[in-house]
Image (cartoon, helix red, strand yellow):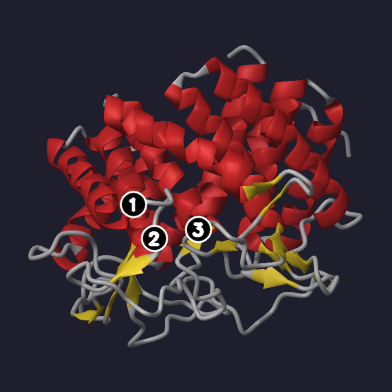
């Protein structure tokens, strides 16, 4: 099937609407407020599920961004709902910052301060401010920025430390999730500080924030990107000694385009040129090392053992679309457009659950869904796939001169 940009854009717009309808129809918690914590693979709600701050801030970002993109008032109403729930339940009124996890009724289960989560708070609050013009949302984004800079920034070696206790004291276990290495610094947390700082800078052109965003971009260029392989290193000691051998293909292609977005927001032409060159290199390597013959993206590879995890997760396919769209826009080369179409066709035929709604969490190499994974959960959210639809539609519109 031949895809012209207009056809692709129309299909992405339809899918954006489908994603948002799913979260509107199935995910409101009308008993305890906010949004439900978990729905399983078969779209059955799991009672008693906890509620994570990452899911809830991503929901706030999603509906705020959807309103900013479509101007449909029902999306702003859902953003309002998410904003109020976060403020009433996740907000630490004593020490500042956002709690990590609540129970079903909204009581605190884990009060730890994961810096990754504070970043998503900034991302969500700043997007909500664009939608609502509520000055309180901007002030909350600024307050989280101050918390990150006060408690997490490493004044000696640079970069940001992973996690703290409720009162911002030190922790022995830094991990974002059980599968992560227990190291004080990670690519993932730095990426999701860069992302919200960029979004905040767009609405609050503060020079200190601009400088911090610039420093973050340079950290990626100098410390996190392995320029021998054009992949990200994932975990580090305090002094930036690399402590991992895993390549995450989804993070590579997501981080590449987020670096471009950040450099554009900063407004530094030299940085824009440098990160654009890196983006194309990282996308090229991802296509060679991380893509299946149908264009879909594998999960990860251990460069020491050579083991390739061939499962295909929902968020990686979404981020691959955006990274490829950026490469298409930067270079004008149809190879990236064609690869983008391949990923989209894989998503349509294999990743979208046309029976129960939304996207499968992951499928195996043969395209068979893993039924033990959730549709909604601590990490399964509407942010990656809805954002991909909006970003790629926007890039196609730019290329068409609209």
Residue 28 in sight here: no
In which quadrant of the rendered image does the N terminus lie?
top right
Residue 28: % across, % down? 32, 66
Residue tagged 3: 239
Name the residue: 77% across, 62% down. Answer: 298
- Circle 2 residues within 10 Å: few <14, some 14–19, many ≥20: many
- Circle 1 residues within 10 Å: few <14, some 14–19, many ≥20: some
Between 280 and 69, the one lying in front of the other is 280
- Which of the two labelled residues, at mark 2 and mark 3, occupies the earlier sequence position? 2
* Secondary structure found at label 2: loop
Asked if the residue under mark 3 is in contact with the one under mark 1, i.e. CB atoms within 8 Å, the reply is no
Counting the numbered discs, the total is 3
Residue tagged 1: 153
Residue 257: % across, % down? 61, 37
- Between marks 2 and 3 in the image, the one whose residue lies nearer the viewer: 3
In the current view of this chain or complex, which residue is farthest to the top? Answer: 401
Residue tagged 2: 161
Q: Disc 2 to disc 3, how far (Cα)?
A: 11 Å
Name the residue: 78% across, 20% down. Answer: 332
The label on residue 346 is none
């Amino acid at each position: 099937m031949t895809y012209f940009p207009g056809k692709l854009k129309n299909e992405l717009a339809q899918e954006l609407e489908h994603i948002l309808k799913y979260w509107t129809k199935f995910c409101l918690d009308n008993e305890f407020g906010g949004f439900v914590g978990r729905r399983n693979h078969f779209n059955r709600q799991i009672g008693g599920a906890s509620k994570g701050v990452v899911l809830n801030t991503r929901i706030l970002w999603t509906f705020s961004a959807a309103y900013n993109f479509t101007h449909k008032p029902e999306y702003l109403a859902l953003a309002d709902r998410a904003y109020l729930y976060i403020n009433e339940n996740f907000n630490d009124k004593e020490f500042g910052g956002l709690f990590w996890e609540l129970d079903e009724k909204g009581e605190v289960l884990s009060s730890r301060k994961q810096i990754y989560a504070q970043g998503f708070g900034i991302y969500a609050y700043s997007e909500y401010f664009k939608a609502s013009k509520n000055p309180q949302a901007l002030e909350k984004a600024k307050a989280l920025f101050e918390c990150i800079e006060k408690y997490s920034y490493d004044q000696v070696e640079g970069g940001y430390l992973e996690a703290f206790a409720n009162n911002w004291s030190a922790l022995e276990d830094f991990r974002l999730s059980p599968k992560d290495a227990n190291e004080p610094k990670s690519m993932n947390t730095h990426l999701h500080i860069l992302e919200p700082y960029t979004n905040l800078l767009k609405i609050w052109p503060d020079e200190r924030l601009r400088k911090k965003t610039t420093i973050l971009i340079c950290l990626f260029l100098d410390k996190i990107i392995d320029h021998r392989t054009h992949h990200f290193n994932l975990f580090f000691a305090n002094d930036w000694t690399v402590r991992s051998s895993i390549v995450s293909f989804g993070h590579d292609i997501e981080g590449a385009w987020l670096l471009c977005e950040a450099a554009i927001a900063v407004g530094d032409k030299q940085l824009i040129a440098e990160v654009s060159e890196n983006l194309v290199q990282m996308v090229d390597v991802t296509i060679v090392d991380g893509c299946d013959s149908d264009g879909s993206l594998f999960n990860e590879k251990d460069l020491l053992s050579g083991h390739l995890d061939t499962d295909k997760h929902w968020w990686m396919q979404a981020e691959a679309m955006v990274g490829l769209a950026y490469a298409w826009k930067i270079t004008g080369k149809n190879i990236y457009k064609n690869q983008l179409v391949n990923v989209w066709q894989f998503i349509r035929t294999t990743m979208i659950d046309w029976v129960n709604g939304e996207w499968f969490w992951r499928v195996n190499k043969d395209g068979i869904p893993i039924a033990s994974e959730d549709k909604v959960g601590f990490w399964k959210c509407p942010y990656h796939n809805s954002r991909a639809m909006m970003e790629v539609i926007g890039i196609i519109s730019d290329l068409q001169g609209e």
